Amino acid sequence: MGSQRLSVVVTRRLPEVVETRMKELFDVTLRDPDERMTRDELVAAARGADVLVPCVTDQVDANLLAQVGDKLKLIANYGAGVDHIDVQSARQRGILVSNTPGVVTEDTADMAMALILAVTRRIPEGLAVMQAGTWQGWAPTAFMGGRVGGRRLGILGMGRIGTAVARRAHAFGLQIHYHNRRRLRPEQEEEVEATYWESLDQMVSRMDVISINCPHTPATFHLMNARRLKLMKPTAVIVNTSRGEVIDENALTRMLRTGEIAGAGLDVYEHGKDINPRLRELTNVVLLPHMGSATVEGRVEMGEKVIINIKTFADGHRPPDLVVPGML
């Protein structure tokens, strides 16, 4: 690459300190105003840059990659999940893909725990009554939720985030169960007294709380489909801080409406911001706007990881957070 500064295009506004540092290091084009790029804008951005810095709202698929020409050499994703990028196609075209793993772990696990507490203790219902000014005062049977301690938590996907959720939940007295592609080492299981289930069906049918913590891949699309959701106990709740596509949202909505599932806490949705309106009407559901990783510290650290990946690449080395198709 030599001493010539890399041209970098960023698709969304990033924290100011990140943008400032990028300007110092690279020939960077920042996004203003902070709106999602249209398809044509994204193609143009990818065409004119050595490095593209997209995020979860940008679809970098095979069709787009076919239009970008030879200049683009690195897609330095701002975020851990890369299900919006066709990594295979990128690699075939000699374009490297990097991400920002590990940074969002603790923040996302905090949010999963917050959703578990919010759903089981009916926090939004209490909040709504207070905001409406209709609270009649304390009553012995009002807003009765369930005790969190002693419940069985089934974690779907025991990677970094799933393990961080397990540590928190264990401290709250939940019993930890998990399903994963690979079983953890005995010492990892012992730390949180976790029970491994080879059969996802069997785990789902016995849990009080299900937490989705696996990435979205072709293998995990609708992993929680209508059939599996029906296996859940009617008293159970499901929480998702991972990717919306892992749950069949329409099936979930139907079952929440009919009382076949007791509640849900969702930070992510199957169709991005197009949320099933029937889901929004339910009182036993806590909906958040994909804010699991939204801490000042987390978002700045994500930016720092992006910068390190680009800088390492510019210096002629392999980016530390390189995504290879075999990992997916």
Image (cartoon, helix red, strand yellow):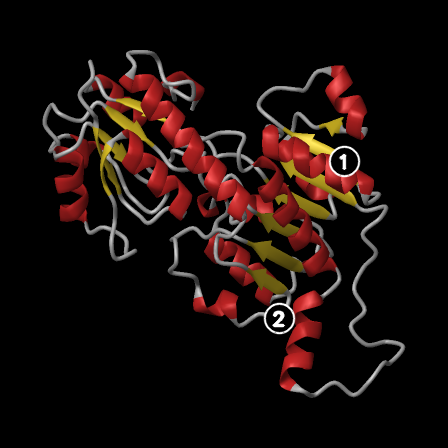
In the rendered image, the quadrant that contains the C terminus is: top left
User: To which quarter of the image does residue 118 belong?
Assistant: bottom right
Q: Position of residue 268 (x, y in %)?
A: 48, 51
Residue 307 lies, with reference to residue 137, above or below; the image says above
Q: Residues within 10 Å of mark 1 (few under 14, many from 20)?
A: many
Q: Position of residue 87 (x, y in %)?
A: 31, 26
Seen at 63% across and 34% down, the residue is 162
User: To which quarter of the image does residue 140 belong?
Assistant: bottom right
Compared across the picture, whether 5 is left or right of 56 comes to: left
Q: CA distance from mark 1 to mark 2?
A: 27 Å
Q: Residue 224: which disc? A: none
Circle 2 residue: 283
Residue 261 lies, with reference to residue 50, above or below; the image says below
In the rendered image, the quadrant that contains the N terminus is: top left
- Whether residue 55 is visible here, answered yes or no, is no
Q: Amino acid at mark 1?
A: Ile
Circle 1 residue: 176
Q: Residues within 10 Å of mark 2 (few under 14, many from 20)?
A: some
Q: Position of residue 38 (x, y in %)?
A: 19, 51
Seen at 54% across and 38% down, the residue is 104
